[in-house]
Structures are given as C-alpha cells and as structure tokens.
Image (cartoon, grey):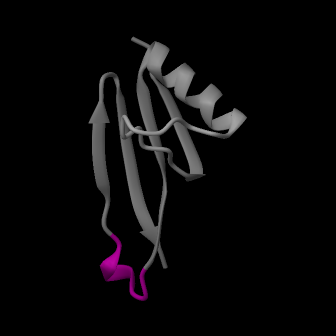
C-alpha cells in the first residue's frame, strides 16, 4: 500500500467551508485524496519554549493532517 508523506511549512486542513486557494496546495490535496497519506507542517502558532510544542492530528478520509507550533 503506497502512502504519500508531505512535509511543508503550512498545512491546509479541510474544514468543509472554504476551498484551498493556492495551486500547489490544491495539487497536494488532490494527490493525498487519491492515494492517502500524511501532511505534516506548521499550524501558524509560535511558542516560547520547546516544552510547549504539541502535535495536533486530524483525520479526514485517507489523510492524516499533523500540525505543530514552532519555537
């Protein structure tokens, strides 16, 4: 079973209300929807200490979205 793993600076988590605007993000989302996989990246938050870093995992269909803040 093949899985696609994407590591990027930002992650677009589908919320069912708005569509993805960027061309690359749309292409990545289409590929993940087709074969499944993981999209890992920054959630847009900053934390001051390493101990404050936490991972959020959201699953939709065949895709796991994993986000975390940066220090």
In the image, 27 versus 48, the foreground residue is 27
Identify the residue at horizontal 50%, vertical 33% (top origin): 5
Q: Quadrant of the N terminus?
A: top left
Position above or below: 41 against 26: below
Identify the residue at horizontal 31%, vertical 67% (top origin): 54
- Marks counted in the figure total 0
Q: Which residues are magenta?
A: 47-53
Residue 71 is situated, as x and y percent measured from the top left of the image, at 49, 79
Residue 51 is situated, as x and y percent measured from the top left of the image, at 31, 81
Residue 30 is situated, as x and y percent measured from the top left of the image, at 55, 21
Q: Quadrant of residue 56?
A: bottom left
Is 49 in the magenta? Answer: yes
Q: Residue furthest right?
A: 23
Q: Residue furthest front?
A: 17
Q: Quadrant of residue 53?
A: bottom left
Position above or below: 69 against 36: below
Is 56 in the magenta? Answer: no
Q: Quadrant of residue 13?
A: top left
Identify the residue at horizontal 59%, vertical 49% (top origin): 8
Left/right placement of residue 6 relative to residue 51 reads right
Residue 63 is situated, as x and y percent measured from the top left of the image, at 37, 29
Identify the residue at horizontal 42%, vertical 27% (top origin): 37
């Amino acid at each position: 079973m093949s899985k696609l793993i994407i590591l990027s600076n930002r992650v677009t988590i589908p919320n069912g209300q708005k569509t993805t605007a960027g061309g690359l993000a749309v292409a990545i989302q289409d590929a993940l929807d087709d074969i499944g996989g993981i999209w890992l990246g920054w959630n847009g938050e900053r934390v001051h200490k390493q101990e404050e870093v936490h991972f959020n995992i959201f699953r939709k269909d065949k895709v796991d979205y994993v986000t975390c803040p940066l220090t």
